[in-house]
Image: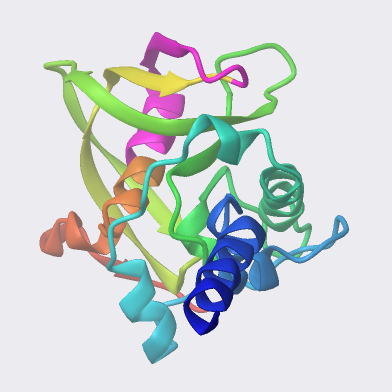
Amino acid sequence: MKFLFAILMILTLCNSGCNNPFTAAERKIIGTGNDMMRVTTIDNEADSTLLRRTSRPLRKKDILSEEFTTLCRRMLSTVQNPENEGVGIAAPQVGILRRVVAVQRFDKPGEPFEFYVNPKIVEYGEEMEYSGEGCLSVPEQSGDVLRSQSIKIEYRDSNFDLRTEAIEGFTAIIFQHEIDHLDGILFIDRMDDDKEEYFEE
């Protein structure tokens, strides 16, 4: 009887938690509503450790969840904060180690922000140039980074279908920066020391 009770308890726990697309800790961070999220920064030891970790891929059931919708909505509010605007944001920057980024598409009419699930760069163009970069997670620091001026990416769309897209110019730079975040890489890791620049707000 005790054995049967134990099995029933395990099944109950799995039904209530095993199928959840996000962990309890992630759901707490994601929360509800439309407001901005706290940005993780290298100034905080725990944040810095998190920012150096590799993010996990998302599954189809994950992106169909209410939590994912809320995460995207709140990430957008965060990157569009009038007091600290950005041109892109990755989930680790709000404390969620999942492979999703938002990028402002300066190469499209209206320059919209768009979300990309499990993005990866599958091809780099040969032309390389230095460009100035900063980051919401690296306060009061900027510097020149050598990046490809054109890339080809693969990602999952809202139906979880695999898509490929060729991207050029400044938007390609943003993609490289944000996808780096998913692998625990910050722009300061790629910064040319000879071109380094610091500034105070």
Q: Please, is residue 6 above or below residue 79 in the view?
A: below
Q: Position of residue 93 (x, y in %)?
A: 50, 62
Query: How many numbered dots are placed on residues in this image?
Result: 0
Instruction: Name the residue furthest right.
Output: 33
Q: Is residue 57 above or below residue 18?
A: above
Residue at the extreme bottom of the image, as rendered:
45
Which quadrant would residue 24 be assigned to in this image? bottom right
Image location (x, y in percent) of residue 40:
51, 73
User: Is residue 183 positioned above or below 172 on the image?
Assistant: below
Which quadrant is the N terminus positioned in? bottom right
Residue span colored magenta: 158-176
Is residue 14 in the magenta section? Answer: no
Q: Residue at x 22, y 35 (%)?
A: 147
Q: Describe residue 200's horizontal placement relative to residue 51 as left or right.
A: right
Instruction: Mark yes or no: residue 71 visible.
Output: yes
Query: Which residue is drawn at the image coordinates 47% and 76% (left, top)?
Result: 41
Q: Nearer the viewer, residue 148 or 94?
A: 94
The x and y percentages for residue 107 are: 55, 15
Residue drawn at x 53%, y 57% is 18
52, 27: nearer the viewer: 27
The image quarter in which residue 22 lies: bottom right
State the quadrant of the C terminus: bottom right
Q: Is residue 103 visible in this depiction of the protein?
A: no
Residue at 20% from the left image edge and 57% from the top image edge: 191
Residue at the far front in the pictured view: 1
Q: Is residue 136 left or right of residue 162?
A: right
